[in-house]
Amino acid sequence: MLSQVAAEDALVFFRPHEFLARENEKPDGLYQILEGWASRYRLLPDGRRQITALYLPGDYCEPHWALGRRPSQPIVALTNVRARKAPCQIPASGSGDIQASFWKNMVDGSERQASWLVTLGRRTALERLAHLLLELFERMRGCGLAYGQQCSLPLTQMDIADVTGLTPVHVNRTLQTMRTRGLIELQSKWLRIPDIAALREAAAISVNDAPA
Amino acid sequence: MLSQVAAEDALVFFRPHEFLARENEKPDGLYQILEGWASRYRLLPDGRRQITALYLPGDYCEPHWALGRRPSQPIVALTNVRARKAPCQIPASGSGDIQASFWKNMVDGSERQASWLVTLGRRTALERLAHLLLELFERMRGCGLAYGQQCSLPLTQMDIADVTGLTPVHVNRTLQTMRTRGLIELQSKWLRIPDIAALREAAAISVNDAPA
DNA sequence: CGTCCACTTGACACTATTCAACGGGCGTGG
DNA sequence: CCACGCCCGTTGAATAGTGTCAAGTGGACG
């Protein structure tokens, strides 16, 4: 899946909290994450923070740059990140597969955003967390990084709060509730979902809702 | 701005509550709104509703279809709508201008979604309403439909609630507050913003935040 | 051994929701 | 023409859900 690497593309590395891009600054290149997680976010004047995208292995950061835009929101590494840096343009060299995966990535990102609008606008705290954990599990599985019903989940509770639009303490409490209800097992950055159908139910996922 | 009409494109009309597209059904065509407003939304199993996009004159509904996707969320007319129907593909005929506006429209839509994630995740009711009214005013101005500090605003308070992730009664109360503070004048579907800077302040807009 | 950071828990405040009722405008039908 | 119903907007009172403030625990690391 991540096997094709065009000859001219460079490997780059980032440490946690290091910027892959800053707002309004021409990006260094178009990155494809090979390993690790990154996030895009916005800060309000008084310090409130909202994460607006999570980038997992396989994801392009950030497809819009290829269409001539500058980042309107900064992107920062959450873990150690290994990425492939390509020029800021629609992937020209290589097979049609690469281009197809590029477009797919862009549209998937946009549909995920639309799903998150629903979650942030209309779902309760527990539903938001269920949605997040399901989405991340499915995405990890999609790139071969899930093992049975488990996967790595390198986010802190504060990160989770900034994704779900909650406060860290409420995230903590709600996760506790989910644990006692047997919906999830989550410890030391490792997630296990005993019953995926039950978690989907708890997330108020409608038939057509991502994650599929 | 909306002057170029390729010869083969058809004009189509919709009445309020009529569908421009249904989820999972191959769309009839790629629409560009010429007049009127439409919305994309999702329903949760228990009936909660969240509007995830508003389409105003000039907007394409829905650019992703041109990349081979089916609608994952239905699109419904909010007012009488007049639109131009084109084949579901990246506009090929016509000048480069048309293609450029198509891509711009897609990326703008995506950036607006990202801004709304911030609003739904982290802003208070008053900030959400201020953000919405500002965005709509700026978009109306962008397509030449604003007059001074005023523009048409054909949404009901229930529509506004479903965009902002609030309840209709809280929208009502919060609009009252904004009126008494002199932030907006809003009656019979007509919006006037006496002091745009003050409204931006009330919206907790950061420097880089859309609307510009 | 001490510091820092993530996580945890309790008590309380507050924003937004819920439920309920009422008024006005407007179209429809008698 | 008026009566009726319906949708939209408005307001009040009680409640639920989430945020805020504060304190304490535990592990990782220098």
Image (spheres, coloured by chain):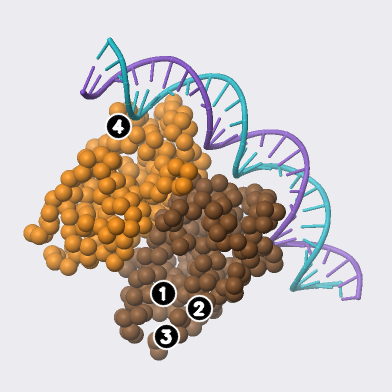
Chain colours: A orange, B brown, C cyan, D purple
Quarter of the image for residue B133 reads bottom right
A30 to the left or right of A204:
left
Q: At numbered mark 2, what does the secondary structure look like: helix, strand or loop?
A: strand
Quarter of the image for residue B190 reads bottom right
Mark 2 sits on what residue? B34
Please name which of the two marks, 1 or 2, marks the residue nearer to the observer.
2
Mark 4 sits on what residue? A189
**Residue A44 visible to the viewer:** yes
- Tell me which numbered mark, 1 or 3, is placed earlier along the sequence: 3
User: Mark 2: few, some, or many residues within 10 Å (few <14, many ≥20)?
Assistant: many
Mark 3 sits on what residue? B4
Q: What residue type is labelled 1?
A: Leu
Q: What residue type is labelled 3?
A: Gln
Q: Which amino acid does label 2 sit on?
A: Leu
Q: Distance between the residues labelled 4 and 2?
A: 50 Å
User: Mark 3: few, some, or many residues within 10 Å (few <14, many ≥20)?
Assistant: few
